[in-house]
Image (tube, coloured by chain):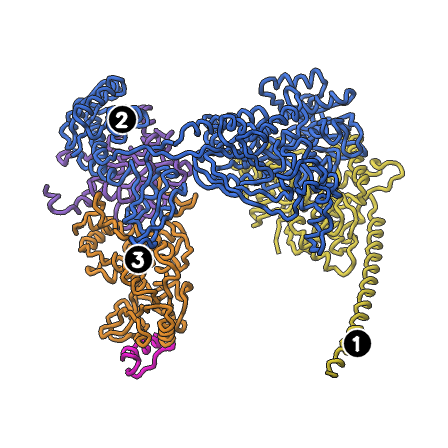
Chain colours: A yellow, B purple, C orange, D blue
């Protein structure tokens, strides 16, 4: 059982509780231990680092230092912004001369910059094999079988390369791997890493809507039945503003957290994954998927039975034949 | 440097490769880098050519110290002579130390054709450390009676 | 050990007759194989050990009837591979050889194969499972090995099931006992001493050398037609036995065995003036083991460390 | 008893300032074996050398020691002088009392004492010098050229015109290489085929050129002047002597839908085919992978399922049962001209290269690479020179050209610059505009690298006269948008994002070393750089030589090269080969190892350490002639004289001439004369 220091950050305790719930649920299923960092504080995104570099590094550093002090080696930061800030801080301290010292002065505690930082997608990608096995092992038919999902990475999860570095910054595939591990079909589309404008969600809503629409349209154009995200901002933005983004008469496109997708594949209930918390109703989609899955399952069983029947018949015939052979043998 | 002289000046024999260290020593010359005058060079094509017997013989003949120097790894004019020399002298170095020869009497170094200054330092360091060790009387004492009287 | 000991006793009685004890299955097997090989003409001579009044000694058996002379017990210290040394072409002239070998001896055969001094087809190897030998072979009969009489080199033997042999006889033997002081311990003790004392120790030891070259003659791996020590023009190694020439000789002997010596200890055993050559030889083994992770084995394909190199070989001693 | 002459040089004041040269000469006079010693102002001057010659004659000296500067400075000078005086040149050595003495010491007494030691040491060495002859190796005056692209053809022609036989081998069915695929060439826009085809034919018909197409190098043995090359002639299934290139087989072949390599996948070919109409030789190859008959055979069908080409061939040239054959050629020099391959960004990438999934190559049919555009623009191409996009065959009205796809991008691709892309993209834009007047050509570039005669003028012309839009910046994403190809880029000069609805996109993908180049390099024992390009012997002074004597390199297999450079390199290799062939024998310093067969025991330890594989095992026979053993033999042609073999020889049975044990021993001994 691998253990991580868990840094939820503000979103997962607030607007994106379902990300937190689904992550914990999935982690438990996959045998990944999460210990929330005691006394964690804000990572500073985005106001912190836009105001002052030292502050921008010190805020995440404090949390890393706590994890270090609490005896952890790796911090899991599901929120893309937190992940990005924590990683950026590690890089800065490692590369900028003298920064390490001044940081531990500022946060008033020693810091060896030894803890690794990982995000939820990274975590799940490395667990892909387990996910596949467990999904196959669940009794209920896998509702995700063959459903078209668009993996949306947004900006902070994979960029800049030197900060994130676990995937290709321009053409990432990690979330797609997770999706296909869930039995779903990760579609090839064009807006994987385009900005959704979340930072301007309040200040410049009109441009946010424009950016968001481009994403949703492209996903739909490539046949996506839902968009999968791993960033609270992307989610709230695409989920909350979709009414405005969607063209007239279009069915809104559910926005799912990657952890929720994995949860469904592992046979967890929508409730346990907080799927009812979204603005775009996920219920119809899930209902449809479950229905389809059940149908597929029934069909398969029927085919199996027929096959079995045929096999039995054949066996019977052979027995007769063999018996005949025996007789001849006796005669001689 | 007869025994009459109170201050001891060591005799050091250097076995150097023709392509790197010898040329590096030439460069030290052309750059007029002054250094101790206690070292005598024997030019060889490659450190790969150097047999530990050369060093043993040098000690026999009264050298207080030796230097073996050639091309840096990967720079060997003959591609791999220095790699073979490196193993040969690693073993020689260890076994000599085992029988009680002070390793400071044996300097091994890589000095490229462009490292005139490094050559000067190698020479000066070798001279100083051997000067501190004093003459290699212990070895000369092994000489046969007759020779010592002569 | 007791089994081989008793086995030896009976054979000590001569021809396996008297003595009372029974011959070990191993020895029986050994004699069988030897006889068959000779009878079938697969080999012209079997070189092994026989029992003599003052102890075990090498024997050349050419007549199948005499195969019963062969013994093996803790007194069989000799490394008979020295008879395969190309310098001994008079042995080769006897015809194809069948050789009785201990695990340590086989490594020397591998050495000869490695250095193209022997063809595998030129010899039939009869391996004997060995539980260690005595330091001193001159005993009327084999006795049980004890920390005081075991050959120190046997401790920690790593070739108790030789692979290179054509036949392997005898039951698996117990580990040889730990000697009062292992060679490694003696080396460590020596290395704890300051340089001056080590120098004093070795020059004193080497000054005893009378340059009889017994160490060279008995060594299975000293294969040169013309030894460097006998070379004049130039004479790298002074031939007269004085401390200085002796040092050169002993350093050279050691270096020539670096990465080759199998540690059979024959040089030391034959040295008439008792120079502890096995300390030098063992030290060499330690050096190549530490630096190049090399331990000599009985695999002829093994690549010797000197004559080979790695780009990232240690060079901490180089400026 | 040797009679050695010692000549101490003042070197003006360079030596005499710190070394008492007279004292040195005096001291050496009394040294045993020295018959003559003197000092002189400038030994290297004519009078100085004359002095040496006279002294040799007057005192009939057996050896000469010049105590002066470094042997690297003047050894040759004095050896020549000694030689002129009738004394073997190798009886002369230099004692370095300048670089190693006068220049690095101040104390006159110390310096003088040291100078005396140095001179004595060398005198002792010279006592044991042997008169030697420079080694002469016979030269086989035939050259092998590997690769039949423009570089290979040029090299072959130059050498052949020089009157020497050339073996030219090409792994494809026809010579011509990439240049034969190009439409027009920068900066002159002359048609590639038109200038290349005559050269191809010339090479084919040249009496001195022996051409092997559809062949590869199997193995290379030997050394400079004396290589033996084993060539694998791959099974062609067509008898080259009988075939008259009528093409009936091609017409008859039922398998017509195979993407043509020559057309970069834009055209189709048959299973039996010549790669392109102007192929040289105009003899088809049967592609067994795609041939129905061979498919049948692979399935193990009893009877042949096809055979139409054989029926169609009136010459009876087709033979389905030919197999790979091997020929050996003896050559004295080898030119490597294997060229490049294009970086295929769509498919699996080798270690360390990420590729450009976001550019949609391979998924979006209208995203093509440079060579594909060359074929579109080529009059002999699949569209007969009309620029039509692959997806629907319509004329693209907006075409985007992306530079540096793979090049100069350590993050995802390769860090080097592919050098030709700036120029050919400009050319592409130009060609497009010439053919589609109302079309729009946009090129995204990092920097415009147009260094070359007429190059910058050319790219300016593309912009200023033909109105190609050059945008400085990178493209972030290319994807299909309805029947358009969307290109997202960034204009770093205007600092704004650019979105273009293009009809077609051309990626200027990087130049990469050919597949299998590392294996070939191994066979030739030449080294390659991290990218697989062949290393030249010296980046500036020996650009077409390799670190293996007798092997030369031309064209894009050494680094990205354009046509003029490749041709220049090829001619340079030609000149190198010619000068190598100008003498019947090669001369080499006799610094080679010699084995004493009487004491050698054939342990071959020397062979293990020889960096050049110069040591062979040689059988020795007893008087009655039967093989009684084996010893080592050092091939003087291959030996370079490092002496590593001698140091590892336990029985001291190898001697390295010019650095023998005796010489070194005497030098060491001489040092005990220190006072």
Real-space Cα distance between discs 2 and 3? 46 Å
Query: Which dot marks residue A320?
Result: 1
Q: Give the crowd class for mark 3: few <14, some 14-19, many >=20 residues within 10 Å.
A: many
Mark 3 on the same chain as mark 1: no
- Please tell me which residue lies in front, C249 or D218: D218
Judge whether residue C6 is colored magenta.
Answer: yes
Q: Quadrant of the N terminus of chain C?
A: bottom left
Q: Secondary structure at mark 1?
A: helix
Relative to A237, residue A127 above or below = below
Q: Report the chain holding disc 3.
A: C
Front residue (pair A276, B126)? B126
**Residue C141 spot, x, y in % from top left:** 27, 75
A222 w.r.t. D401: above or below: below
Question: Which mark is nearer the camera, 2 or 1?
Answer: 2
* Chain holding disc 2: D
Are the two marked residues, 2 and 3, in contact with CB atoms closer than 8 angstroms? no
Residues in magenta, as a range: C1-25
Which residue, given by chain and number where applicable, does mark 2 sit on? D83
Label 1 environment density (alpha carbons within 10 Å; few <14, some 14–19, many ≥20): few
Which circle marks residue D108 in the picture? Answer: none
Give residue A307's quadrant in the image. Answer: bottom right
Q: Is residue D606 magenta?
A: no
């Amino acid at each position: 059982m691998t253990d991580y220091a868990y840094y939820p950050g503000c979103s997962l305790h607030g607007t994106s509780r379902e990300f937190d719930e689904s992550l914990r649920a999935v982690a438990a299923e996959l045998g990944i231990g999460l210990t929330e960092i005691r006394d964690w504080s804000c990572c500073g995104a985005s106001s912190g680092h836009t105001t002052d570099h030292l502050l921008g590094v010190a805020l995440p550093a404090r949390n890393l230092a706590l994890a270090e002090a609490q005896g952890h080696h790796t911090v899991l930061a599901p929120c893309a912004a937190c992940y990005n800030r924590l990683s950026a801080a590690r890089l800065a301290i490692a590369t900028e001369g003298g920064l390490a010292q001044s940081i531990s002065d500022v946060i008033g505690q020693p810091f060896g910059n030894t803890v690794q930082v990982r995000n939820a997608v990274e975590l799940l990608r490395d667990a892909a094999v387990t996910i596949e096995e467990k999904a196959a092992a669940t009794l209920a038919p896998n509702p995700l079988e063959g459903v078209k999902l668009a993996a949306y990475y947004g900006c902070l999860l994979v960029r800049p390369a030197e900060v994130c570095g676990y995937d290709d910054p321009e053409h990432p595939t990690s979330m797609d791997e997770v999706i296909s591990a869930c039995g779903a079909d990760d579609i090839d589309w064009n807006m994987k890493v385009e900005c959704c404008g979340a930072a301007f969600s309040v200040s410049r809503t009109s441009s946010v809507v424009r950016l968001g629409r481009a994403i949703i349209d492209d996903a739909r154009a490539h046949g996506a039945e839902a968009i999968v995200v791993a960033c609270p901002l992307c989610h709230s933005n695409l989920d909350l503003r979709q009414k405005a983004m969607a063209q007239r008469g279009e069915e809104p496109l559910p926005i799912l957290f990657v952890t929720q997708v994995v949860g469904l594949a592992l046979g967890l209930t929508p409730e346990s994954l907080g799927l009812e918390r979204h603005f775009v109703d996920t219920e119809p989609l899930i209902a449809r998927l479950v229905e389809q899955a059940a149908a597929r399952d029934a069909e398969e069983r029927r085919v199996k039975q027929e096959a079995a029947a045929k096999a039995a018949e054949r066996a019977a015939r052979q027995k007769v034949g063999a018996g005949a052979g025996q007789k001849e043998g006796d005669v001689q | 440097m007869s025994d009459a002289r109170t201050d001891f000046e060591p005799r050091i024999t250097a076995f150097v490769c023709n392509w790197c260290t010898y040329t590096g020593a030439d460069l030290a010359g052309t750059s007029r880098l002054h250094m101790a005058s206690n070292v005598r060079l024997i030019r060889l094509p490659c450190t790969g050519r150097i047999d530990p017997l050369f060093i043993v013989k040098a000690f026999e003949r009264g050298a207080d110290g030796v230097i073996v120097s050639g091309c840096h790894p990967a720079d060997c004019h003959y591609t791999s002579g220095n790699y073979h020399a490196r193993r040969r002298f690693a073993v020689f170095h260890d076994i000599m130390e085992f029988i009680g020869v002070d390793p400071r009497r044996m300097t091994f170094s890589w000095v490229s054709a462009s490292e005139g200054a490094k050559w000067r330092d190698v020479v000066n360091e070798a001279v100083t450390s051997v000067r501190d060790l004093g003459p290699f009387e212990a070895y000369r004492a092994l000489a046969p009676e007759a020779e010592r009287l002569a | 050990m007791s089994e081989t000991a008793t086995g030896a006793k009976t054979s000590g009685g001569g021809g396996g007759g008297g003595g009372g004890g029974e011959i070990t299955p191993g020895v029986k097997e050994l004699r069988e194989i030897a006889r068959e090989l000779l009878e079938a003409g697969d080999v012209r001579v079997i070189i092994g050990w026989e029992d003599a009044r003052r102890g075990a000694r090498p024997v050349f058996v050419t007549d199948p009837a005499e195969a019963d002379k062969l013994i093996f017990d803790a007194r069989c210290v000799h490394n008979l591979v020295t008879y395969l040394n190309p310098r001994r072409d008079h042995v080769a002239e006897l015809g194809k050889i069948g050789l009785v070998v201990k695990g340590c001896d086989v490594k020397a055969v591998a050495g000869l194969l490695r250095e193209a001094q022997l063809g595998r087809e030129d010899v039939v190897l009869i391996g004997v499972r060995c539980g260690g030998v005595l330091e001193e072979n001159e005993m009327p009969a084999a006795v049980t090995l004890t920390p005081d009489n075991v050959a120190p080199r046997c401790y920690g033997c790593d070739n108790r099931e030789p692979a290179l042999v054509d036949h392997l006889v005898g039951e698996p033997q117990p580990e040889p006992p730990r000697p009062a002081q292992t060679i490694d311990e003696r080396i460590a003790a020596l290395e704890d001493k300051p340089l001056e004392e080590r120098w004093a120790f070795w020059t004193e030891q080497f000054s005893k050398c009378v340059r009889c070259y017994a160490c060279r003659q008995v060594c299975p791996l000293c294969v040169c037609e013309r030894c460097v020590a006998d070379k004049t023009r130039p004479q790298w190694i002074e031939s007269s036995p004085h401390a200085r020439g002796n040092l050169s000789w002993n350093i050279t002997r050691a270096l020539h065995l670096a990465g080759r010596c199998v540690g059979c200890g024959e040089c030391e055993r034959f040295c008439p003036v008792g120079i502890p050559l096995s300390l030098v030889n063992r030290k060499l083994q330690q050096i190549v083991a530490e630096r190049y992770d090399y331990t000599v084995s009985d695999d002829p394909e093994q690549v010797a460390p000197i004559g080979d190199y790695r780009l990232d070989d240690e060079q901490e001693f180089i400026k | 008893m040797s009679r050695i002459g010692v000549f101490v040089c003042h070197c003006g004041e360079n030596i005499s300032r710190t070394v008492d040269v007279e004292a040195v000469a005096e001291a050496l006079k009394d040294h045993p074996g020295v018959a003559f010693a003197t000092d002189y102002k400038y030994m290297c001057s004519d009078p100085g050398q004359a002095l040496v010659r006279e002294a040799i004659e007057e005192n009939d000296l057996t050896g000469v020691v010049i105590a002066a500067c470094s042997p690297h400075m003047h050894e040759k000078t004095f050896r020549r002088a000694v030689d002129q005086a009738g004394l073997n040149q190798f009886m002369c050595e230099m004692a370095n009392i300048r670089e190693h003495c006068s220049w690095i010491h101040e104390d006159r007494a110390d310096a003088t004492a040291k100078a005396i030691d140095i001179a004595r040491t060398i005198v002792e060495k010279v006592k044991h010098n042997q008169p030697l002859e420079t080694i002469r190796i016979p030269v086989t005056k035939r050259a092998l050229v590997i690769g039949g692209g423009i570089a290979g053809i040029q090299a072959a022609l130059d050498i052949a015109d020089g009157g020497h036989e050339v073996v030219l081998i090409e792994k494809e069915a026809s010579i011509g290489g990439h240049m034969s695929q190009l439409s027009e060439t920068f900066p002159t826009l002359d048609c590639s085929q038109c200038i290349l085809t005559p050269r191809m034919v010339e090479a084919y018909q040249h009496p001195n050129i022996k051409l092997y197409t559809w062949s590869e190098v199997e193995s290379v043995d030997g050394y400079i002047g004396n290589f033996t090359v084993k060539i694998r002639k791959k099974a062609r299934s067509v008898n080259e002597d009988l075939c008259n290139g009528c093409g009936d087989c091609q017409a008859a072949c039922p398998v017509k839908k195979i993407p043509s390599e020559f057309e970069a996948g834009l055209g189709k070919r048959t299973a039996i085919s010549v790669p392109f109409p102007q192929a040289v030789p105009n003899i088809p190859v049967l592609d067994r992978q795609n041939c129905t008959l061979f498919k049948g055979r692979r399935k193990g069908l009893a009877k042949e399922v096809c055979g139409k080409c054989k029926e169609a061939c009136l010459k009876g040239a087709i033979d389905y049962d030919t197999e790979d054959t091997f020929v050996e050629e003896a050559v004295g020099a080898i030119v490597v001209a294997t060229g490049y391959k294009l970086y295929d960004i769509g498919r699996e990438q080798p270690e360390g290269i990420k590729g450009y999934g976001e550019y949609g190559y391979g998924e979006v049919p209208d995203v093509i690479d440079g060579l594909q555009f060359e074929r579109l623009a080529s009059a002999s191409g699949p569209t007969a020179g009309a620029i039509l996009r692959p997806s629907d065959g319509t004329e693209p009205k907006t075409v985007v050209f992306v530079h540096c796809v793979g090049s100069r991008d350590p993050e995802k691709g390769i860090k080097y610059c592919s050098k030709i892309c700036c120029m050919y993209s400009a050319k592409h834009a130009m060609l497009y505009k010439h053919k589609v007047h109302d079309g729009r050509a946009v090129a995204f570039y990092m920097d415009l690298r147009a260094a070359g005669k007429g190059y910058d003028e050319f790219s300016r012309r593309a912009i200023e006269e033909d109105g190609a839009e050059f945008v400085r910046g990178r493209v972030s994403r290319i994807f299909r948008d309805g029947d358009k190809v969307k290109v997202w880029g960034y204009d770093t000069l205007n600092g704004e994002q650019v979105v273009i609805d293009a009809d077609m996109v051309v990626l200027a993908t990087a130049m990469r070393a050919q597949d299998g180049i590392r294996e070939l390099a191994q066979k030739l024992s030449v080294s390659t750089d991290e990218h697989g390009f062949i290393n030249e012997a010296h980046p500036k002074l020996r650009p077409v030589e390799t670190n293996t004597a007798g092997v030369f390199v031309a064209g894009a297999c050494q680094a990205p090269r354009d046509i003029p450079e490749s041709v220049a390199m090829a001619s340079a290799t030609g000149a190198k080969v010619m000068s190598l062939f100008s003498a019947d024998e090669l001369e080499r310093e006799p610094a080679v190892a010699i084995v004493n067969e009487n004491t050698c025991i054939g342990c071959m330890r020397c062979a293990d350490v020889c960096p050049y594989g110069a040591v062979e095992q040689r059988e020795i026979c007893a008087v009655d002639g039967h093989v009684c053993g084996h010893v080592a033999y050092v091939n003087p042609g291959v030996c370079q004289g490092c002496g590593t073999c001698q140091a590892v020889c336990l029985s001291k049975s190898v001697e390295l001439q010019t650095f023998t044990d005796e010489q070194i021993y005497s030098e060491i001994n001489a040092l005990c004369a220190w006072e």
